[in-house]
């Protein structure tokens, strides 16, 4: 019977049908999705910290309002993705505990500090820009709830990228000091943004199986290349220099060639030893503890409501 179920599953994947929560699926497919989707959700929630750091420091009320809207969107994306992951049979508490115990990851990029206001521009332009390249591809993922979450999230991400790029346009049109701030942010955020796409395909632990199950529709290197090709002209428009002396247009390939990523830094950061890893987890644990009373009150309310319905 299992063989039949597996054949039906594989036929659905081959036909680009979506796998839904109640469908039979191989346990390894379920586990891979729980891994990737929960880490995606953690990334959205932890990503609120570096950006939230500038809510009280935004240069004017308009920028503060836009940043507030963006941070609030990230929270919503996280909740949306946690709910989509729960359809695979894991609870919110189990996912959050796994992150607190560093058994689950979140995007390495959020372990870097936001030192100046220009960083908020660079995050919107580069980090949300990279996330959009990745998430547009993930709209076609084979798991229904994840695909639908991506379609909704992609609609909001373009505003995130545009507001970031707009911050940098303003800085680059400003004083020499402001332009230098934008260049400094690009220097610090460029390479960690390329790392968001994961290791090279040949070193990727999951890509082959994820591509076979159509969880991943485009490879890490293809998406990274797409991001570089679309971002270099945007840096040129700003009059900023990308910190990569090997970056050059390759007419043969029809793509930009670029330098080697520092994978030792990548490994350090994804294994808990980046600039802000401890702070991010400590902050999340504190927020989780401070919010415990709200969760308890909601649970008590649900029990009371259920009691009244029965009575
Ligand atoms: N940060 C942290 N961990 C990373 C990583 C990164 N940038 N890139 C890869 N890894 C981890 C993988 O999770 C995996 O570790 P694990 O086995 O413990 O999960 C290991 O490195 C090997 O990498 P693989 O390429 O084999 O792993 P994947 O097939 O999962 O590919 C991925 C990595 C492309 C990031 C894929 O997981 C993915 O597409 N995830 C969904 C997208 C996502 O998480 N985006 C977060 C960006 S931030 C964001 O969206 C917020 C936005 O609003 C700014």
Image (cartoon, grey):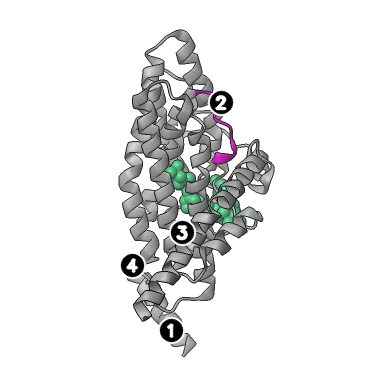
Disc 2 to disc 1, C-alpha distance? 53 Å
Whether 88 is drawn above or below 259: the answer is: below
Disc 3 to disc 2, C-alpha distance? 30 Å
Label 1 Cα neighbours within 10 Å, binned few <14 / some 14-19 / many ≥20: some
Contact between labelled residues 1 and 3, with CB atoms less than 8 Å apart: no
Tell me the magenta residue range. Answer: 110-116
Residue at the spot 32% in from the left edge and 71% down from the top edge: 15
Residue 39 covered by magenta stretch: no
Q: Main secondary structure of the magenta part?
A: loop
Disc 3 to disc 1, C-alpha distance? 27 Å
User: What residue does disc 3 label?
Assistant: 82
User: What residue does disc 4 label?
Assistant: 16
214, 67: nearer the viewer: 67
Residue 5's mark?
Answer: 1
Q: Earlier in the sequence, mark 3 or mark 2?
A: 3
Q: Marks 2 and 4: which is nearer the front?
A: 2
Q: Position of residue 115 (x, y in %)?
A: 56, 25
Residue 113 covered by magenta stretch: yes
Q: Earlier in the sequence, mark 3 or mark 4?
A: 4
Q: Quadrant of the C terminus?
A: bottom left
């Amino acid at each position: 019977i299992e063989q039949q179920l597996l054949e039906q599953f594989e036929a659905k994947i081959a036909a680009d049908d979506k796998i839904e929560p109640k469908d039979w699926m191989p346990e390894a497919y379920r586990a891979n999705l729980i891994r990737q989707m929960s880490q995606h959700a953690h990334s959205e929630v932890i990503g609120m910290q570096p950006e939230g750091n500038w809510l009280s420091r935004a240069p004017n009320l308009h920028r503060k309002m836009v940043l507030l809207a963006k941070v609030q969107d990230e929270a919503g994306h996280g909740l949306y993705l946690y709910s989509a992951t729960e359809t695979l049979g894991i609870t919110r508490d189990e996912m959050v505990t796994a992150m607190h115990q560093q058994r689950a990851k979140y995007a390495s990029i959020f372990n870097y500090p936001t030192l100046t206001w220009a960083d908020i521009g660079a995050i919107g332009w580069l980090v949300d820009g990279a996330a959009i390249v990745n998430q547009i591809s993930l709209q076609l993922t084979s798991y229904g709830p994840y695909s639908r979450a991506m379609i909704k999230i992609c609609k909001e991400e373009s505003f995130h990228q545009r507001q970031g790029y707009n911050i940098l346009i303003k800085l680059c049109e400003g004083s020499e000091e402001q332009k230098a701030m934008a260049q400094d942010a690009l220097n610090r955020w460029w390479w960690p943004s390329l790392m968001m796409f994961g290791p090279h395909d040949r070193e990727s632990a999951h890509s082959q199986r994820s591509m076979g199950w159509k969880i991943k529709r485009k490879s890490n290197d293809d998406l990274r290349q797409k991001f570089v090709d679309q971002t270099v002209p945007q840096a040129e428009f700003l009059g900023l220099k990308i910190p990569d002396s090997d970056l050059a247009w390759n007419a043969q390939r029809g793509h930009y060639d670029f330098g080697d990523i520092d994978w030792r830094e990548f490994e350090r950061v994804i294994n808990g030893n980046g600039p802000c890893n401890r702070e991010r987890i400590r902050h999340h644990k504190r927020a989780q503890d401070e919010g415990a009373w709200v969760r308890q009150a909601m649970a008590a309310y649900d029990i009371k409501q259920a009691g009244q319905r029965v009575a």
